Amino acid sequence: MSSIWDIINIPLGWIIKISYSLTHNYAVALFLFALILQIILFPLGIKQQKNSVKQASLRPKEMAIRKKYAGRTDKPTQQKLNQEIMELYQRENFNPMGGCLPLLIQLPILFSLYNVVVSPLKYICGYSAEVIANIQAKIYELMSAAGTAGYEMYEAGKAVRQIDLITKMRELGLSNFVDGSGAAITEDALPNFTILGGAMDLSQTPSFTNFNLLLLIPLLTLIVTLGSTFITRKLTYNPNPEMQNDISMKIMNLSMPLLSVYISFTIAAAIGLYWIFRNILGVVQQLILIKLYPIPRFSEEDYKAAEREFGAKSQSKKQQKQGGQKVRSLHRIDEDDYDEPAKPDDGKPRLKDGVDPSTAPQLKEDDRTPRKSEEADVDSGDSDGKDENNKK
């Protein structure tokens, strides 16, 4: 019975099958598989790097906006801050979520690879569900007839990993099993998961209860994941460099490699080996991308220019000595958050809104000086008012 995952599983199984047929070594085939996937996903890596470069190029402007509202943590001000930053992103055609696509694609690929590794009879050998069910039934028949312990797990209808079926097929003799055409299954038809002369079986799960060379897989996973995480963070643009030494960030940098080690103790060693190859190739890709699309660097003058553009003011010397932020109102934008208009270079005085007095409309002399008739009217009006008061 096919599933929606077959949309990804079948192509991945085909890639592994081709890689194995070229190398006849499952470890080398996994490396070739990881390399092919890295090449296929390289355009997404370019897109992610370009997105980082774009974000880095907006750093001075974003910091100028943040500086304009520094010291205020009330909700209205924070909403205004976020709104201006989003407007900046929209003007510059920058999508802050644009770099997440490659990371999101990696997860379903890892799940699909697990399905391909644990189900080689379907995805690598190409056997139908009926042939696989017959193989499981034959194993149950042979083991139960011989009284071999544990034969109950191979009973029809029970879920058994296909890599475990291949191991039992070899133990019981491949001549006892047939493919879809009725021909006996040969050694060449099945993938061989053993490497180093049979010292390591990549179809098995590393365990401390079975102390062997497979324990190298979790150890190498820890070393490679820690190293690749450190190197990649150094080569990747960080929009929040002040959080680099934050305790939560350090915990995350350590927890992810430890989680990878834990997972490597719960799945087939082939998955852990692929993850090792994937991390190494990821570092190589990032080294290439940082050369092709370097992250821009900015001087102090660039940040000051952005502050002038967005009207951000630096702290006064008095405030800097006090070591604190100026107290601002909570629910409105202060007028002194914005710089005063620049003075004209010619040194001439300016009226309000920067209007030159020489170009302002001039009043006529008659308009400036009240006419005598108007003065008389005013005087008479005043005297009439006084007479009325006296009468009262």
Image (tube, rainbow, N blue to C red):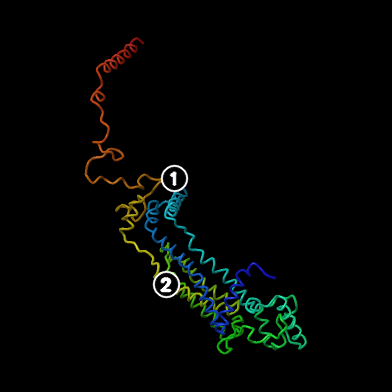
Q: Quadrant of residue 242?
A: bottom left
- 10 Å crowding of disc 1: few (<14), some (14-19), many (20+): few
Q: Amino acid at mark 2?
A: Ile
Q: Position of residue 162 (x, y in %)?
A: 66, 79
Instruction: Point out the residue furthest to the left here.
Output: 347
Asked if residue 378 lies left or right of residue 247, the reply is left
Q: Which mark is residue 40?
A: none
Q: Which mark is residue 288?
A: 2
Q: Report which quarter residue 159 is drawn in.
A: bottom right
* 182 relative position to 270: left or right: right
3D distance between C-alphas at marks 2 and 1: 48 Å
Q: Nearer the viewer, mark 2 or mark 1?
A: 2
Q: Residue at x 34, y 51 (%)?
A: 309
229 versus 326 height, above or below: below
Which of the marked residues, 2 or 1, is nearer the chain's N terminus? Answer: 2
Q: Amino acid at mark 1?
A: His
Residue 144 in the image, given as x and y percentages of width and height: 76, 85
Q: Residue furthest top?
A: 391
Nearest the viewer among 20 and 239 is 20
**Badge 2: few (under 14), some or many (20 or more) residues near its Cα, within 10 Å?**
few
Q: Which residue is mark 1?
A: 331
Instruction: Give SS at disc 2.
Output: helix
Which quadrant: the N terminus? bottom right
* Left or right relative to 195: residue 171: right
96 to 167, vertically: above or below: above
Query: Which residue is outermost to the right?
Result: 145
Q: Secondary structure at mark 1?
A: loop
